[in-house]
Image (cartoon, rainbow, N blue to C red):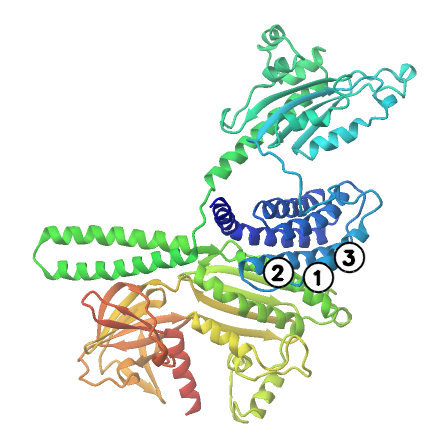
Amino acid sequence: MSDDNETFDLDVLREMFRSEAYELIGELENALLALEESPREKDVISRVFRALHTIKGSGGACGFDNISRFAHEVEGVYDAIRNDKLVVTREIINLTLAARDQIAALFDEAYKKTTAESEVTEQIINRFRSLLPEGAAPRTKKPAEPAPTVEEPQATYRIRFRPARNIFLTGTDPQLLLDELRALGTCRVVAQLGDIPPLETLDPELCYIYWDVILTTTRGVNAIKDVFIFVQDTSELTIEPIEIEGVLSDDDEYKKLGEILVERGDLSPADIEEISSEHKRFGEILVERGLVNNDRVEAALTEQQHVRGLRRDRQKSEELSSIRVQSDKLDKLVDLVGELVTVQARLTQVATEGNSALLLTISEEVERLTAELRDNTMSIRMLPIGTIFNKFKRLVRDLSQNLGKSVELVMEGADTELDKSVIEKLHDPLVHLIRNCIDHGIEMPDERAAHQKPRQGTIRLSAAHSGAHVLIRIDDDGGGMNIAAIRRKGIEKGMIQHDAELTERELFALVLSPGFSTASQVTDVSGRGVGMDVVKQAIEALRGTIEITSRQGAGTTIIMSLPLTLAIIDGFLTRIGDDHFVFPLSLVDECVELTAAQSRKMGDRDLLNVRGEIVPYIKLRERFAMQGERPAIEQVVIAKVDDFRVGFVVDHVVGGHQTVIKNLGRMYKGVEGISGATILGNGSVALILDVPRLIQTVEREGTNT
């Protein structure tokens, strides 16, 4: 029974660790890519070490002994780097990235039931061991079974270590003791130099320095005492807790400088009273009067800043605290909110048609609360698009190296938020587009230099809000597209007529057609004409649009417009006969009336004069072959897509409508111009119009006639 409980607890622990494990893998990759750019940056080296250390410790606690052992071996190299026994090289970065991939494979083996090759793990371990200098091998003989460490509440200690003057004669190096303290947690050390005598009387074999240390750790006071176990009888050592998590104050402020110095025994209360009335800085007065030296003031200030920083970080952590929720539970919540929105619309309709003022008041209150609940629920699903942007750094690095190119990825707008479901489906299209930019767009370094360009190419990935949409833009400064070659390939494949007059926009759109490629040779990356049409299909499945512009020699720009959410939108309800249609409200510019006298034709196009502006319009009744008589005065809903205004003729305008999007199913998947459906308050179904696709379809049919 006991064994079963232990197994159950371990399974629960592993499941709780799942998302954190993959976050740690992502942090490790980002830190390694940052380290490649700044190989001497101590903070970045520490980021890599911390990620590996956490994977090792947390993985071991969850029973992932193989992962813990593997991470321990990699960690040993970065421990040597931290201690200046190794320097960061391209070989170490490449090997650690390979180790990161293997750690991910091992987690996938545990969580996703895939298979990781164990021999790869051993190969990488052997290569890491070969990098270590003599004496720098990992300390633990059996890293798979590390000695258990007792975790205590996080505490901050004030330590004063004054070694015996003759400590050097015993073969002890105080610096090594301070390094052991640093390994226990966050540590700040201030050397006290006030006892150093003049040079003519100084004995080089004696130690005149002592140290004040501020240490924040979860290892407890006994671990600190263990560091000094061989020198404690001959040295002066004081260890005093000054901040214990959950026990002492969480205010931003900490003790004043004078209080700290008094507690340390460096100053008397009488000295504080004597100088409290002066207007100079307290520390400056103390030094000027010779009450304490500058080193002791610095040590007290260090303690003050350290504890204040800890408290601010703790408060910030509490403010930003969050809970992890399984995505299927979140999807279920959105579905329930969608059903609530539908019921609320029904309640509003009943209240409007009835004679009860009380019912109408209740209906309005429910409508307000439902709208607020809807907005809050939608905001929960929103994630910063940077969650996928960061994954492309590794893609650009590896692919550019494989192709012998130098490419920099610049990211902007990573904090732009987008619906979780949209982000999940956006990864693969972006991967393909960035691969194309590197393979087809960015030239080889020598070729770029010959055209007076920087040898390093740049890909710029940016995101920004635009109304109810997010615009994702990919720019490269490569060779651009040859529009003449695109036209020739289009004619060759029978996509366009030899004498067809197409705009640049229409010609670039051919690149998104199935099987279209102007690449002179097929590579491992691209050139088969497969992929860009899949990208287009994926973006359109998200009810988005994609557009390409390019200038030969200057680069290419790809712009994708995507809706913020795929679940609930603000709609604009209209009616044709007995059927209802919904326009996305974000696209609706205005509504005008249409009479027979106002309409005119120019060739096959219907045009409307709106305050001096000629606006083409589409008759939806004719478009959808709907029967029935047209009213004498029709309504034109004018929508704006890509700065281009197009009207849609309907019988009647109903008004704004909270629209819960429902899929139409497989049978209606190919219907152009309809993106989904919604249920109205009376239980009937209204179709949601795909406005950009409708416009594209009509333009294409007009071009072919």
Q: Is residue 241 left or right of residue 141?
A: left
Q: Which residue is mark 3?
A: 91
Q: Position of residue 275 (x, y in %)?
A: 61, 9
The residue drawn where x is 60% and y is 68% is 434
User: Closer to the observer: label 3 or label 1?
Assistant: 1
| Quadrant into which the C terminus falls | bottom left
Q: Are marks 1 and 2 in contact (CB under 8 Å)?
A: yes
C-alpha gap between disc 3 and disc 2:
21 Å
Residue type, mark 3 in image: Glu
Callouts 3 and 2 close, C-beta under 8 Å = no
Secondary structure beneath dot 2 equals helix
State if disc 1 and disc 3 touch (CB < 8 Å): no
| Between 217 and 43, the one nearer to me in the picture | 217
- Disc 1/disc 2 C-alpha distance (Å): 10 Å
What x and y, as percent, mark residue 110?
Answer: 56, 58
Q: Amino acid at mark 1?
A: Val
Of mark 3 and mark 2, the one earlier in the sequence is 3
Q: Quadrant of residue 586?
A: bottom left
Regarding mark 1 in the picture, which secondary structure is present there? Answer: helix
The percent position of residue 169, horizontal first and vertical second, equals 88, 21
- Residue 598 shown left or right of residue 207 in the figure: left
Q: Position of residue 318 (x, y in %)?
A: 47, 37
Mark 3 or 2: in front is 2
Can you tell which mark lies on residue 105? 2
Separation (CA) of disc 3 from disc 1: 17 Å
Residue identified by numbered label 1? 120
Q: Which numbered disc flags the more N-terminal residue, 1 or 2?
A: 2
Q: Mark 2, residues whose alpha carbon is within 10 Å: few (<14), some, or many (≥20)?
A: some
Query: Is residue 478 found left or right of 361 in the rendered image?
Result: right
- Which residue is drawn at the image coordinates 51% and 53% (left, top)? 415
Sequence-wise, the earlier of marks 3 and 1 is: 3
